[in-house]
Amino acid sequence: MLPAADAPASPAAAPMSPVAGRVAFRVVFVWAALACLPWPLALVPGGGRVVDVVRGPWDALVVAFGQHVLGIARPIVRIPGDSTFGWTQLGFEILIAAIAAAVWSAVSRRAAHPRLDAALRLYLRWFVAAAMLGYGVPKVFGLQFPHPTLARLAERVGDNSPMGLLWTFMGASLSYQVFCGAAEVLGGVLLLWRRTTTLGALIVAAAMANVVMLNLCYDVPAKIFSTQLLLTAVWLAAPDGVRLFDLLVRRRAPSAPTDAPPPWPSRWSGVVSAAGFVLLVLIIVQNVRIVVSIRQGATPASTLIGAWRVESATGVDWEHVVIGYYRETAIVRVRHPNDAEERIGADIDDAHRTLTLTTADGKRVMSWWVVDPDHLSLESAAMSLRLRRLPEPTWLLYSRGFHLVTEAPFNR
């Protein structure tokens, strides 16, 4: 066995080659500028208008890249998420970052960019922190995944889309939703301070690894952004990777941390601290607005909402009707005598007592009135219905409850 001083270095501790390290940093630097800027300008009052002005020429470049370089024939329209525009923009960002890094490396002979590296880490950890708080705070209040409504619970499981099933699964358990949100908030808060950056990045990486897999496996159109957050969290934790490997795997005392120099002169420290405080206030205000807007968009109450049995009908062969909301959209679910189900988009107007059904044949406006507390009548030119309200079903999903001791699996 070799003495400790003569022992070969661990493969995990082997440093990246200087050239590869410089090029990788330059690619990440340019990509971060393209993918994240002009954040946090949109947080500043009036900054949204500036963002729109900048976004116009950028969107035109992305569309031109998609049409003339990638040969995409379909329309390329800015739609948030994993749209054609989203994937085209990602490819454009990677191409520009690679070209810019190549030119940068050709004209610059500097071995390292410590101040740029420190500035990039500072910017990215605040960017990721803001994103995690933006996703986590609504979950903590149980707002991102709403409690499944009657209309949603009345659907067959097989009629759910993968994303719809995920939303129902998350909304069915407030405690699990709060747990996921708390993990995201904790990781985001820890990223706000330099000393806790690595711990926050590890928590964010763990939380986002789960989010990325859910987005991939349940077809949620947020795969691009969630993967970017995951990779950025890993990048933020990477400088301490060797030290963590020494501590957790090699069982050796880690080396002393090496902190990058601040990217600003010491005389600017007070200004930077004040700017950080202002940015923190803007992030908090943004999250308060998100929570308030979601609460204001809560499902409205209506006399029509509920499960109904059709006592008499002309013009249709409906047996049961469930009227409710899924998120902010009114839904009418109909069951026919052959047990077939139909989902109809609707608009409920309590003020004028109308129910507008949107079908493949167009819109049908029905007037409704309450006959008595248990009966409702709907009527249009082509159909009329008399409905009897059914008692709220006792869903097993909620009546089963929590059991610390279970003698046998109850899997139904």
Image (cartoon, grey):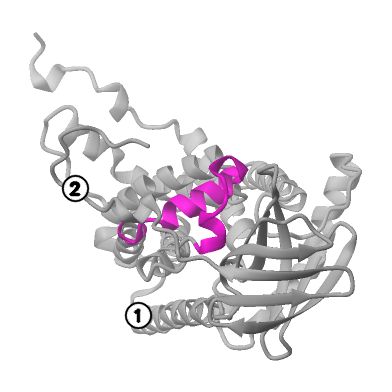
User: Gap between marks 1 and 2, in whole Å?
Assistant: 50 Å
Mark seen at residue 273: 1
The residue drawn where x is 28% and y is 44% is 240
Q: Is residue 313 visible?
A: yes
Q: Please say if 50 is above or below 315.
A: below
Which residues make up the magenta segment? 149-178
Give the crowd class for mark 2: few <14, some 14-19, many >=20 residues within 10 Å: few
Left or right: 184 in relation to 222: left
Q: Is residue 228 visible?
A: no
Determine which of the numbered discs, if any, sits on residue 86 in the image. Answer: none
Closer to the camera in the image, 404 or 23: 404
Asked if residue 136 is among those painted magenta in the image, a careful observer would answer no
User: Quadrant of residue 297 in the image?
Assistant: bottom right
Q: Which of marks 1 and 2 is nearer the N terminus?
A: 1
Locate residue 46, reporting x and y percent.
Answer: 64, 87
Residue shown at 39%/58% (left/top)? 394
Q: Which of 169 and 268 is in front in this view?
A: 169
Quadrant that contains the C terminus: top left
Residue identifier under label 2: 403
Judged by depth in the image, the label closer to the viewer, 1 or 2, is: 2
Whether 155 is among the magenta residues is yes
Viewer-nearest residue: 245 or 67: 67
Q: Is mark 2 on a helix, strand or loop?
A: loop
Q: What residue type is labelled 2?
A: His
Expressed as whole percent of the image width and height from the top left, the position of residue 337 reads 69, 47
| Residue 399 screen position, x and y as percent | 31, 55
**Residue 14 appears left or right of 255:** right
